[in-house]
Image (cartoon, rainbow, N blue to C red):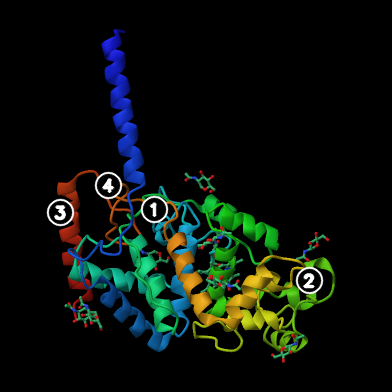
Amino acid sequence: MSSSHCIAIALFCIAFLLGGISASHAQLSSTFYDATCPNVTNITRAVIENALLSDPRIGASLIRLHFHDCFVDGCDGSILLNNSDTIESEKEAALNNNSVRGFGVVDDIKTALESACPGIVSCADILAIAAEESVSLAEGPSWAVLLGRRDGTTANRTGADITLPSAVDTLDTLKEVFLAMGLNTTDLVSLSGAHTFGRARCVTFSDRLYDFNSTGNPDPTLNSTYLETLQGICPQDGNENVLANLDLTTPDTFDNNYFSNLQLENGLLQTDQELFSTTGADTIDIVNNFSSDQDAFFDSFVESMLKMGNIGVLTGSEGEVRLNCALVNADSSGSESFLHSSIETRDNAEDKYAI
Ligand code: HEM
Ligand SMILES: *[C@@H]1O[C@H](CO)[C@@H](O)[C@H](O)[C@H]1NC(C)=O
Ligand SMILES: *[C@@H]1O[C@H](CO)[C@@H](O)[C@H](O)[C@H]1NC(C)=O
Ligand SMILES: *[C@@H]1O[C@H](CO)[C@@H](O)[C@H](O)[C@H]1NC(C)=O
Ligand SMILES: *[C@@H]1O[C@H](CO)[C@@H](O)[C@H](O)[C@H]1NC(C)=O
Ligand SMILES: *[C@@H]1O[C@H](CO)[C@@H](O)[C@H](O)[C@H]1NC(C)=O
Ligand SMILES: *[C@@H]1O[C@H](CO)[C@@H](O)[C@H](O)[C@H]1NC(C)=O
Ligand SMILES: *[C@@H]1O[C@H](CO)[C@@H](O)[C@H](O)[C@H]1NC(C)=O
Ligand SMILES: *[C@@H]1O[C@H](CO)[C@@H](O)[C@H](O)[C@H]1NC(C)=O
Ligand SMILES: *[C@@H]1O[C@H](CO)[C@@H](O)[C@H](O)[C@H]1NC(C)=O
C-alpha cells in the first residue's frame, strides 16, 4: 500500500470517528421542538390531566417509565417496545412485568402528537415530558425538559434484569447501580424522593413485615404502628398484587413528606428506609436536608432528573422517531419511505381515532 493511500484511509477514519463522536454527543435542548411542534408540552399535559381524572396514580406510573427507560441502554424509548420476532421486550423483565404501567396513556399522547405534528416527537422525549408534567400536575416542581432524543430500534430484557435496582438491594448496591449511570449519592436520594407518590405491590415489601432478610422477624427499622397498618393491607400469604401508597401521608402529592416519613421509620420499601436508617451512612444528612427544606429537595430533584434524562441518549440521525411507541418503524432506512409511512400512519390514526 502506498503512503498516500495510508494517509487517505487514516484521514477518512479520523473524520468518521469525529463524526461518530459528535453525533453521539449532540446536546439535548429545551427548544428542540419550538419550530416543529411548539405545543408539545401542552398537548402532553392535557392527555395526562384527562387520565388523572380516572387514575390518580398515572403520573407516578409515567415518571417510573422514564426512569426504567433511561436505566436500560439509555433514554431511548426501549421500554415501550412490544415483543416481536426481533424484540424481547423490557416490559416483561422481572422488575417490570406486572409492575410498570401507563402504556395506554403514552399511546394516547403519541396519537395526539402525531395528529398535531406527524413524525416529529420521539417516544423517548414523550416519556421525559410526561415525567415532568406528572410531577408538576402533582404540585411538584416544573422545569425546562431537555429534548431531542431519538428512539432506539432494540430492547434489552437481559439488560433490564441486570441494571434496574431491586427493592431489597443494600444501600451500597444502590449507590453502585446509580454511579454506573453517572448518578451520585445526592442524585440517589433526590430521585428516590419520587416515591412521594404512587403505589407499590405487597410483594415488593412484604418480607419486611414477617421475615426480614431471613431473620424470621419484621424489619427493625419499620415503625411499629406502620407495621400493623401494612400487615392489615398485606396479610401473610395474601394477594401479593394488593397496593399500598408509597407515601402514607400525602399519597398523590409531590412534596418532601417522603423524607419526613423516613425520619419516622415510615418508609415503605427497604431501599427507602435504608437511606435514613443505615448506620453512619452519608445519605442521612441529605434526607434531613430535604425533609427540612422542600425547595432544596425540588432544586436537587430537577438537577438529578436532567442528569437521568441524559443517560445514553440517541440524537441527530441516530435511531428513529417511532410512529407507534410499541413498534419499531417498518422501514426507517430512507427518508422518502419514512415520509410515506408517516403519512399512511397518520391517515390510519385519523380513521381510528376520529372524534
Ligand atoms: C432507588 C432505587 C429504586 C428502587 C429499588 C425502586 C423500586 C420501586 C418499587 C419496588 C416500586 C413498586 C413496584 C411494584 O409495585 O411493582 C416502585 C414504584 C415507583 N417508583 Fe421506584 N424505585 C427506585 C427508584 C426510583 C426512581 C429513581 C424513580 C423516579 C425518578 C422512581 C419512581 C417510582 C414511582 C413514581 C413509583 C410508583 C409507580 C406507580 O404507582 O405506578 N423510583 N419503585
Ligand atoms: C400552552 O399553555 C399555556 C398555558 O395554558 C399557554 O400560555 C401557552 O400559550 C400554550 N402554548 C401554546 C404553544 O399553545
Ligand atoms: C395547545 O394544546 C392545548 C391542549 O391540547 C390546546 O388547548 C391549545 O389550543 C393548543 N394550542 C395551540 C396553539 O395549538
Ligand atoms: C403492545 O402490547 C400491548 C399489551 O400486550 C397491547 O395492548 C398493544 O395493543 C400492543 N401494541 C401494538 C402496537 O401491537
Ligand atoms: C409476565 O407476566 C405474565 C402475566 O403474569 C406472564 O404470563 C408472563 O409469562 C410473564 N413474562 C415473563 C417473561 O416472565
Ligand atoms: C444489554 O444490557 C447489558 C447490561 O447493561 C449490557 O451489558 C449489554 O451490552 C446490553 N446489550 C445490548 C445489545 O445493548
Ligand atoms: C441481610 O443479612 C446479610 C447476612 O446476614 C447481611 O450481610 C446484610 O447486611 C443484611 N441486610 C440488611 C439490609 O440488613
Ligand atoms: C411512628 O410513626 C408515628 C406517626 O406515624 C410517629 O408519631 C412516631 O414517632 C413514629 N415512631 C418512630 C419510632 O419514629
Ligand atoms: C441541602 O441541599 C441543597 C440542594 O441540594 C444544597 O444546596 C445545600 O447545600 C444542602 N444543605 C445542607 C446543609 O446539606
Ligand atoms: C452530585 O450531583 C449533583 C448534581 O445532580 C451535584 O450538584 C453535586 O455536586 C454532586 N455531588 C458530588 C459529591 O459530586
Callout in the foreground (2, 4)? 4
Residue under circle 4?
317
Q: Quadrant of ligand 4?
A: bottom left
Q: Please tell me whether residue 17 is drawn above or below residue 79 in the rendered image.
A: above
Furthest toward the right, the residue is: 216
Q: Name the secondary structure under disc 4.
A: loop
Mark 1 or mark 3, earlier in chain: 1
CA separation in Å, label 4 and label 3: 18 Å
Quadrant location of the C terminus? bottom left
Label drawn at residue 212: 2
| Quarter holding residue 18 | top left
Q: Nearer the viewer, mark 3 or mark 2?
A: 2
Q: CA distance from mark 2 to mark 4?
A: 49 Å
Residue at numbered disc 1: 313
Q: How far is the residue under mark 1 from the one under mark 3?
A: 26 Å
Q: Is mark 2 within 8 Å of ligand 7?
A: yes
Image location of residue 262, percent across then percent down: 67, 79
- Residue indicated by mark 3: 340
Q: Amino acid at mark 2?
A: Phe
The answer to whether 253 is drawn above or below residue 104 in the figure is below
> Mark 3 belongs to which amino acid?
His
User: The N terminus is located in which quarter?
Assistant: top left
| SS at mark 1 in the image | loop
Instruction: Decide which of tag 3 and tag 2 comes sooner along the chain.
Output: 2
Name the kind of residue labelled 1 in the image.
Val
Disc nearer the start of the sequence (2/4): 2
Q: Marks 3 and 1: in contact by CB < 8 Å?
A: no
Q: Residues within 10 Å of mark 1 (few under 14, many from 20)?
A: many
